Image (cartoon, coloured by chain):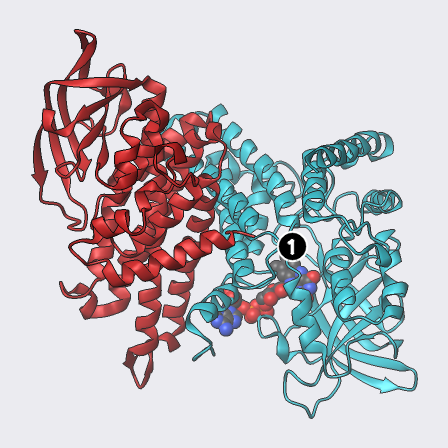
Chain colours: A red, B cyan
Amino acid sequence: MTYSQEQEQLRETLRAFLARFGDDKEVWGRLTGELGLTALAIDERYGGFGATLAEVGIALEETGRALLAAPYLPTVATAAALGEAAADELPGIAAGTTVATLAVAEPGTAWRLDALATTARESGGGWRLDGVKEYVLDGQHADLLAVVAEGGLFLVRAEETRRTGHSTLDQTRPQARVVFDGAPGVRVGDGRAAAHAVDLHLLALAAESVGVARASLEATAAHLLTRTQFGVPLATFQALRHRVADLAVKVEAATSTVWYALRADPDELPVAAPLAKVVATEAAYAVTAESIQLHGGIGFTWEHDAHRYFKRATANRLLFGDPVTLRRLVGARAGI
Amino acid sequence: MDGDLAAFRAEVRDWLAAHLTGEFAPLVGAGGPGREHELTELRVAWERELGAAGWIGLGWPVADGGRGADIARQVVFFEEYARAGGPGRLSHIGEYLLAPTLVAYGTPEQRRRFLPPIARAQELWCQGYSEPEAGSDLASVRTTAVRDGDTWRITGQKVWTSLAHIAQWCFVLARTDPSASRHRGLSYLLVPMDQPGIEVRPIVQLTGTSEFNEVFFDGAVTAAANIVGAPGDGWRVAIGTLGFERGVATLGQQVGFARELDAVIAAARADGRLADPVHYDRLVDAWIGLRVLRYHALRTLGESAGANASVAKLLWANWHQRLGELAVDEPGAMLAEGEPYALSDAQRLFLFTRADTIYGGSNEIQRGIVADALLGKVGRR
Ligand SMILES: Cc1cc2nc3c(=O)[nH]c(=O)nc-3n(C[C@H](O)[C@H](O)[C@H](O)COP(=O)(O)OP(=O)(O)OC[C@H]3O[C@@H](n4cnc5c(N)ncnc54)[C@H](O)[C@@H]3O)c2cc1C
């Protein structure tokens, strides 16, 4: 069986919840408070439910499907990356009072881990960080930043940094530029831990993209079934049916790939995560782009949701490495 | 459980190592799509060797002469078989298409009569569905069968019939009631090939070799009992056969794909193409695509055939075809290896994969099934 009964139940509960409160201003408080969604994969000792990445993946698919505008993805991916190394922070994350995010990309070099300019120097028993980070997801709302710098992974309190929120193409998820000017930090991991944190974000974006793609595909199918032209529903035309079938193949392939990666052995993750990210974000991009086409004029309007899905898919495709970059990474890690 | 599986794997591996040698050594890597013409007689002998050791019908119920092996064991067998370079199978049409059909729709007598010779590779089968006028539109078959005393008498023509030239039996979709509507007048008959009323003519494929045939039925006979399901129920049975998708076999097929991909990457490395970023991107994409095939098979394993079987077919057929194109993306591929038309592995892969998107339900037909699942059947013409 592909998903357990509990997992299916989680999916249903969350889908119903997001359908009801997805656009609510208080959605973050409800998600973390009433549902305890950020607590899902956190160990019970720290106020979590002790579930696995597979459950987090389901939650991400659902938040992607709803285009949730709340800092769920960076918070849970960062929490998963930190684990015990940030034991003090986990209860806050589980309770939803701490929003966490990962700062990796830098101006000019994007997510290239071999070209980091951000430095960390030891000072008085702690560390001081200097540098500039770009494209930090929900950076202006975050309380806690996990920072990839020369020499490893560091934790920095947000108030120790200077943050500028960006206006974003995908308006459902804000990004920030974060400046570290001798910001005090705690070292929580080495370069491998930093790479692992990035891999977990790739995986999270992949899972979310499956939800984005599936929602967009379903909306497109519904439109073809209801919109009538030439006296028949659009779904009658084989040219369109086959295009929808090709999109469905991409979505199923992406679902399988993410399903596998969420259950992969930790030593498989360096390949499985970027691979899943490529497959799922390319699927989501293809589906959401084609969705606009198959909706016709209405799909080009501000009012219709098609462009919101398209823009989320576009951002997800670029975040933490575009497909070309990630294929190169997969190739290198696979020894090709 | 896992220990048992490891022991089973070792058993398969040891058996293959001990038997794929000596007289059978030339078979390593032989046969299979595009190479079915190779070493046919020796491969038939190999099938009997497999059958005698109980490797055919691994997943069938024990009562039917199988071993009742679970999916994990069947997968292990395919993986090890492919890893050992086991030759392309000749008994697969009986084992994977007819046998499950008989288990699902056949009578106990039919199962007793036909399953054991399949398991021992004493009788090879071919699939008589397609006709000159009935391809994707299978329900329009024109071959007829009429009752004549204790027999059915069959007249008509089948085409593209793989391995008909070595098969002892053919399962034939024929029209038994011309007055009934298209789908209702069909029957599923089991017909012996070695008789005066049947003529098999090979068809040369674009590879220059031949593995499929035209089959002419001119008053050919089979016993009245050799009908699966009731007269007029043939469409349901025929579609049932198509539903016994390759299933677990796909994971074994993927081991063969992996070998082909390795060869394509090795060739690109040897001639420097791998260093070109555009080529590199395409080859890594192929590598990723093969992983996706695997993940999809693992996620959907054991699911009953449905839209996901069509998704899997579209995924692998397109992937394989793309690999064939990557394989010949260098000028040397313009030259044949020798006279009269000897092809390299890369050229054979390239040419044969054009068929992958046609047989077993073409890409267009598979897209139709996937679309039906999403959009309902409105307007499918
Ligand atoms: C290597 C090989 C081995 C084979 N082995 C066997 C065998 O052992 N036994 C057997 O019975 N058959 C066998 N076949 C036949 C195979 O099943 C048919 O070729 C296939 O079903 C297509 O039928 P057709 O060739 O008549 O093409 P057609 O059905 O005429 O199709 C021609 C083109 O039109 C497209 N098309 C058809 N209908 C539609 C539609 N409704 N909508 C959109 N597009 C459509 C098809 O996809 C295809 O691209 C084999 C074929 C090959 C290539």
Residue B77 placement (x, y as % from top left):
72, 41
Q: Which residue is the extreme one toward the right?
A: B150
Which chain does the residue under circle 1 lie in? Answer: B
Q: Which of B152 and B37 is in front in this view?
A: B152
Which residue is at a point 74% across and 66% down the rendered structure image?
B101
Which residue is at a point 58% across and 75% down the rendered structure image?
B137
The answer, for residue A246, to whether it is visible in the render is yes
The amino acid type, in three-letter code, at marker 1 is Arg
| Left or right, residue A194 beside residue B146 | left
In the image, is the residue at mark 1 within 8 Å of ligand 1 by its beta carbon? no
| Left or right, residue B323 beside residue B97 | left
Assign the N terminus of chain B to one quadrant of the image: top right
Instruction: Write down the residue under mark 1.
Output: B246
Question: How many residues crowd around disc 1 within 10 Å: few (fewer than 14), some, or many (20 or more)?
Answer: some
Up-down relation of residue A161 to residue B367 (above or below): above
| Left or right, residue A56 beside residue B51 | left
Up-down relation of residue B262 to residue A61 (above or below): above
Up-down relation of residue B82 to residue B354 (above or below): above
Q: Which residue is the extreme one toward the top?
A: A124
Residue A117 placement (x, y as % from top left):
18, 18
Total marks placed = 1
Ligand 1 appears in which quadrant? bottom right
Residue B41 placement (x, y as % from top left):
84, 46
| Left or right, residue B289 beside residue A134 | right
Which residue is at a point 78% across and 81% down the rendered structure image?
B230
The answer, for residue B336, to whether it is visible in the render is no
- The quadrant in which residue B358 appears is bottom right
Which residue is at a point 54% across and 36% down the rendered structure image?
B261
In what element is the residue under mark 1?
loop
- The quadrant in which residue A198 appears is top left
Residue A31 placement (x, y as % from top left):
27, 50
